Every structure is written in structure tokens, then in C-alpha cells.
Amino acid sequence: MIREAGILLDKEERKASIVEQVNQAAALLGGQAIIEEGLLNEVTNLIEMPTAVMGGFNEEFLALPRDVLISVMKKHQRYFPVVRATLVVAQGDEKAQGQGQALPLLPNFIAIRNGDDIHIDTVREGNEHVLGARFADANFFVREDVKLKLEEYRPKLSSLTFHTKLGSMLDKSNRMLKLGAEIGGLLGFKDMLIIKTLARAVYLSKADLVTQMVTEMTSLQGIIGGEYALRSGEAPEVAAAIAEQYQAVPQSKPGMALALTDRLDSLVGLFAAGLAPTGAKDPFGLRRAAIGVVQPLIEYDIDFDLSEAVKKSVKTQPIPVSEEAQKQILEFIAGRLKVVLGDMDFKHDIIEAVLAAQSTNPAGTVRAVKQLSAWVGREDWSSILDGFARCVRIIRSANLDDKPLTIDDGKFVEKEERDLHAAIQSSAVNRPSSVDEFLEIVTKLIPSITAFFDKVLVMAEDEKVKENRLGLLQKIASLSSGIADLSKLEGFNSK
């Protein structure tokens, strides 16, 4: 009865029907629709009897920034934009989605009506009228905004409060200028074009917040800044960095550095102000900001010292940032890094092992997790882990309190301890800097470690002999320092 009336109760069936109708309508218009998952789900949950409605708008509006047109259609009206038919942009096809976003828009849209196609022309006219009014408003805002250059909006940021303890958005922007130069250095930027691009992009990055267009549509912050930067005569590289600053992973290095600068300033300042997220409460989006620090560094595979970056940001803040707060910030970012690593399908114990030893260099952490995962998958892994674990367990049970023991060649009694010492000296010439280097050394030491435990009593009655033997094991156990805590791994305590 319900189905006969055209009502589709099953969500997935409604969703499929909407996708099919939207694609058919776009084809009739000579184009293809941009179907984003978020908008598709929203429309699916609002509609029970989906019917596609094709509409159009005045071609003059195509002169507006493309993102303004798309945002108005999607966010305000829940319409699907239509682009030129060059390739298929399908729901769930992220690569095609990205390409579709770059194609020229057609002066058309597709709406989904909740009902049948009776009086469809009236429905179309109503939708076109509403959209035309929205575009006319946007056209007015843009026309008024571009009367000034983007740079001229920057002083007006003083009227926007970032936080009462941290000052205005202009204050934040000025802090970012100082921090941005430091971040560029930590990222290893040496190309003067990149350095100058970053400096200019940071300077202008927040100026669009006081424009009429962004005041009306906050989701366009950054995007409009990039558009207005171009219209103000700024270099394309500067405009691109400004436009990318709110992306999860900016496409350019200056954009990435700008995003890191913004997010680190917010994290450090707001933690210092006592506004760390609690439970489900995160009004300033600091969890998102922390992930936004981690993800770009991983994607670009750039070594970056978060601990040093936090210290640099601390120096620019208008309020004190305690050592405890700095520790909390780094732990908070490490927590988000753990989430990202989990989403990458690495095993929980491997993630824990690496994070316990290193977490302030996200790209390095990911490399370590990948390397350790490969080692754990080896056929000889259990023997490697067991040999190393025996050394660590004895050192921990001896309660040495991290006191470094001196190894005295003259105190050796058994051949096997001399052999182990010689093997350590030849294999561990330099401190290992990666999981691969560390475990390659351990692998070479395994025969000597095995022989040592078979023939030598570590806890000898002679205190000096015992300390000498513990010193050998301490030397082996310390190889993992700053690389990974293998005691977090499954199988570490199995024997």
C-alpha cells in the first residue's frame, strides 16, 4: 500500500533512487551532477517520495566565485550542482568527485522534491526563484567586498574576538605571523619563494573573516579569502595557500605550513586558557585541529618536532603556558595520532609500542609503525622478540631505576659474556635511529644472547660480576629507547 503510493521506506533504496534520478536529470541537461555523500545522505533522510526536479539560473551568476555558487546550492537549498559532461561523477567515487569539482559549472541544478511529478513546473519555478534570490544576495556581497583589497580588511579583525584571554582575531593573526616563520624553519623550508609565499599567506589568512560574504556563509572562510586574494592582485601561490588553510590536508607546502601555524596557535592558546576538550564537549574544535596537525605531516611524510613547535608557540601567547599544559597538549595530539593510526588499520599493540616511545614526530611515528608491522609479520619474529624480551624483563626486575651500569672487561668470567660484549660492540656502533636499524642489530645479537642465557647465570653471587652482566643486558635493552617499547606487543611476556 505504502509502496504503491510511491513512498520508499528503505533508506538505501531511497538513496539509490535519488542517485539514479539525479544522474538521469543531469544527462538530460547535457551535464553531470556533483553528488557528495554528505548532501546525498541529508536529502535521503529528508525525503520519503523522491522526485528529481531540473532547474536553471541566469548565466550571469556564473561570474560569481564557483565555490559560492556550489555552497549556496548545497548548503542553503540542498540542490545538486551540474557541471559539464566530461566524466562520470558518481556517489562514492572520490577521485571523480575531486575532478568534478574542478569542471565548469552549468547554469543548472537538480532538486529533489518530496512527492510525485504533479505540478512539477510550478515546483521548478519556485526553486528557481528562491535560488535566484540567493545568488542575487551573494552577488551583492561579493560586489561590495571587492571594493576593498583583501589586505584592507585585516585591521578590521580587531573587532572580532578570538577569546577573551587571547585577544582578537587580529591578535591571533599577529601571533601567527611570528609562529609561521618558525614553523617554516621546523619544516625545513629553504626555498625563498616558499618562505615569502608563506609569510604573505599568513599575513592575509584571516582577513576574509570580516567580509560580507564570509559573514553570510562562514563555510566559505579561506575559500573566499583565496578568491579575493587573486582579485586583489596577490600571487596565485599566496591565494592557493589561503584557500587551503582549512582543508584537512592542504595541497601546497605553504598551505600546509599556514594550516599548522593556525592550528598550533589555537591548541596552545586555548589549552593555556583552560579550554581543553572534556568528554563530548569540544566547542573550539580542538580535536579536529589536532588531527589537522597530524594528517598533513603524515601525508607529506615530513619530519617535524611537535614538542619544539609547541615551545615556539608558547613564546607568542599573551598568557602563561605551564609545563603541565604543554605536556597535555602533546599528549592530546598524540591521542589524535593514535586515532589516525587506528584508521590506517595498524594493529593496536604495534601502535601502542611505538607511541610509548615516540609521538612528537607524526611522520616518523607512522614510518616506525609500518616498519614494526613488517617485522612482526616475519616468520622468525617470535625468536627475535623473545631474545630481546628476556634482556628487558631481567633489567626491569632488577629495579635499576634507569641507573646506567658500567661494563668492565676485566670482570668477565665466561666466554659467552665476552662474546656477547664483542657482538654488542661490533653491531651497535651507532645508536639506532629507526625500527629497522634497531631490530637489525637485535637480530645479529640473537645467537650471542641465546648462548649467554644458556651458559651464564646473570644474578651471580659476586655483586660486581652480576652488575657487569646486567650492564650487558641493559645495553641491549636501551637500544629501543626513543624507538619503540616492545613490552606493549603481544607475545612479549609469553615465555
Image (cartoon, grey):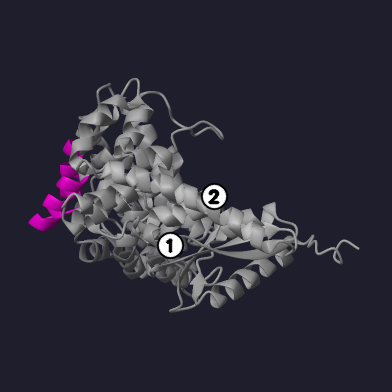
Element type at mark 1: helix
Q: Amino acid at mark 2?
A: Val
Task: From the image, give the main secondary structure of the stretch colored magenta.
Answer: helix
**Toward the viewer: 273 or 434?**
273
- Dot 2, crowdedness within 10 Å: few (<14), some or many (≥20)? few
Residue positioned 43% across, 34% down in the render: 284
First in sequence: mark 1 vs mark 2: 2
Residue 63 shows in this picture: yes
Image: 375 above or below 227: below
Residue to which mark 1 is pinned: 387
Residue 446: x %, y % from top left: 37, 67
- Dot 1, crowdedness within 10 Å: few (<14), some or many (≥20)? many
**Toward the viewer: 493 or 481?**
481
Q: Quadrant of the C terminus?
A: bottom right
Residue 31: x %, y % from top left: 49, 74
Distance (Cα) linking label 1 and label 2:
73 Å
Q: Amino acid at mark 1?
A: Gly
Residue 23 among magenta residues = no
Callout 1–callout 2 Cβ contact below 8 Å: no
**Toward the viewer: 167 or 470?**
167
Left or right of 97, for residue 55: right
Residue to which mark 2 is pinned: 130
Element type at mark 2: helix
- Range of residues picked out in magenta: 177-201
Residue positioned 65% across, 62% down in the render: 121
Q: Quadrant of the N terminus?
A: bottom right
For the image, the number of numbered tags is 2
